[in-house]
Amino acid sequence: MPLENEISNTRTVLQIDNEILDNITGLIELQAEKSLLNIFADLHSADIAEILNHLDSENSKYAFSILDAEAASEVITELDENLKEKILKEIDVKTITNIVEELYSDDATDIISGLPDHIAKQVLKNLDKEDSEEVKELLKYAEDTAGGIMTSNYVHVNNNATIKDAIEEVRKNADEFDHIYNIYVLKENDELLGIVSLKSLLVTSLHVNIMTVIQDDLIFVTPDLDQEEVANIMKKYDLIAIPVVDEHRRMLGRITFDDIQDVIHEEASEDIQKLPV
């Protein structure tokens, strides 16, 4: 049975075994780019990354090189750090820029912070000005802090907005932002007043002011808080997202549960490495 047929309809869960890896390796050795892309098209980015993580270095580099910028951006965030570093050393500035342009600001910052300074500067120069400024701002924070893991991508409205305005803002950003859990309500100076849930938007009259349904009993963190403490807070209060604010409660960004999952994994790995042999 061709591997394309074997993998089809298994996008939800794929068990990576030696047979699949051998077949992928064989196609790479033949440089059967079209067949590989047909297979990858049916796979989740996490499954593609797992396959690449199990291949030898040269085969992984080839498989990654045939992905378009959108697919590559989804895969690179799932790769083991060592492999990610090797791949980034092999690809040119233009390719890195194209990948980074597809990423959220927090993931883009992670990639750029790991590049040699001269490469990082070129990528930042090539980025759209707004995206470049966002990444530069995030690079100011230590990578193991709330500021280091937050994203500056979030949906917000000001306190004079109506429910209709908020819904339009969600629609406008739906394609660009994943994981829209809440809408943040800000003053004109970006001071965070509270949040409004998507459910509230759906069950409230369109012309009602947003402040009517605001939740102002907020839990938030500051950018200098250690990432492990952020994880503890989100776990304790069962949060799927948490805002990051400065000392004047001005909104800086948000941290979502998928960011915290990565932190929990990193901290667990570090704890295991510290155990006596």
Image (cartoon, rainbow, N blue to C red):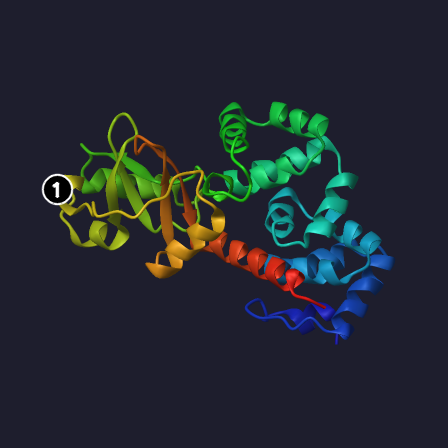
Residue in the picture at 82% in, 63% down? 25
Residue 185 or 48: which is nearer the viewer? Answer: 185
| Residue 261 placement, left or right of 67 | left
Report which residue position mark 1 lands on.
Answer: 208
Residue in the picture at 47% in, 39% down? 147
Residue 151 or 29: which is nearer the viewer? Answer: 151
How many residues crowd around disc 1 within 10 Å: few (fewer than 14), some, or many (20 or more)? some
> Where does residue 71 sit, x and y in percent of width and height?
62, 49
Residue 2 or 266: which is nearer the viewer? Answer: 266
What is the quadrant of residue 220 in the picture? top left
> Where does residue 188 sit, x and y in percent of width and height?
25, 26
What is the quadrant of residue 253 in the picture? top left
Q: Tally the numbered discs.
A: 1
Q: The residue tagged with tag 1: helix, strand or loop?
A: loop
| Residue 184 placement, left or right of 211 | right
Residue 32 or 250: which is nearer the viewer? Answer: 250
| Residue 46 placement, left or right of 147 | right
Asked whether the viewer can see residue 178, the reply is: yes
> Where does residue 262 sit, x and y in percent of width and height?
54, 55
Residue in the picture at 37% in, 51% down? 241
Furthest residue to the front?
276
Residue in the picture at 58% in, 71% down? 13
Amino acid, disc 1: Val
Residue 71, above or below 54: above
Asked whether the viewer can see residue 66, the reply is: no
Q: Quadrant of the N terminus?
A: bottom right
| Residue 22 placement, left or right of 161 | right
> Where does residue 177 sit, x and y in percent of width and height?
43, 44
Q: Quadrant of the C terminus?
A: bottom right
